[in-house]
Amino acid sequence: METKEKKTKETLSQFITPQQLLEHWKGHRALTRRVIEAFPEDKLFSFSIGGMRPFSELAKELLGIGVPGAKGMATDQWEQLDENVDLGGSKEKLLQLWDQATEELNHWWAQIPVEHFQDTVIAFGQYEDKVYCSILYFIDNETHHRGQGYVYLRALGVEPPNFWER
């Protein structure tokens, strides 16, 4: 049985566990998936406001970052950032790829050593930062693009999912 003093000291040295961070990210991914589902299929690939990219293009960026980023962190083998995902013009295909990516994220995440979160990496051969900072950026980027999706949905007269339901 751990003493309260030891547990408190460990708690102070670690704010969040890697598994908790993954669950947090997967909560965001689940919400982004519901945003994708809410789009009328034709508008997912064509609708934009003010010159911004259609939401399908934003989703392709997220697919190009998440799993390849986790894989790079797990293996220290980084590929170039590639957002050229073939969605076949289909929301169903996008959702399938999204779900597959979540499973792959689980796989690669489990292979990132806990001590590696403090190491500096050059993600995708161009973005230098600590592993945990890069992960937070990946989550922030998804949140940012999901916010664009909310604006698009509202402009289309579609009620977006509740943002707090992750």
Image (cartoon, rainbow, N blue to C red):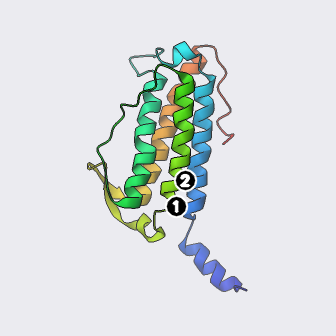
Type of amino acid under label 1: Ala
Residue at x 37%, y 54% (from the top left corner): 72
**Quadrant in the picture for residue 12:** bottom right
In this view, 6 is above or below 117: below
Tag 2 and tag 1, C-beta contact below 8 Å: yes
Q: Residue 143's spot in the image, x, y percent?
A: 52, 39
Q: CA distance from mark 2 to mark 1?
A: 6 Å
User: Mark 1 = which residue?
Assistant: 110
Vertical placement of residue 140 versus 18, above or below: above
Mark 1 packing: few (<14 Cα in 10 Å), some, or many (20+)?
some
Q: Please state which amino acid type lies under the numbered disc 2.
A: Asn
- Asked if residue 42 lies left or right of residue 83, the reply is right
Q: Is residue 102 left or right of residue 1?
A: left
Q: Which residue is mark 2?
A: 106
Which residue is painted at 52% across and 29% down in the image?
A: 94
Say which element carries label 1: loop
Q: Residue at x 36, y 66 (%)?
A: 119
Q: Secondary structure at mark 2?
A: helix
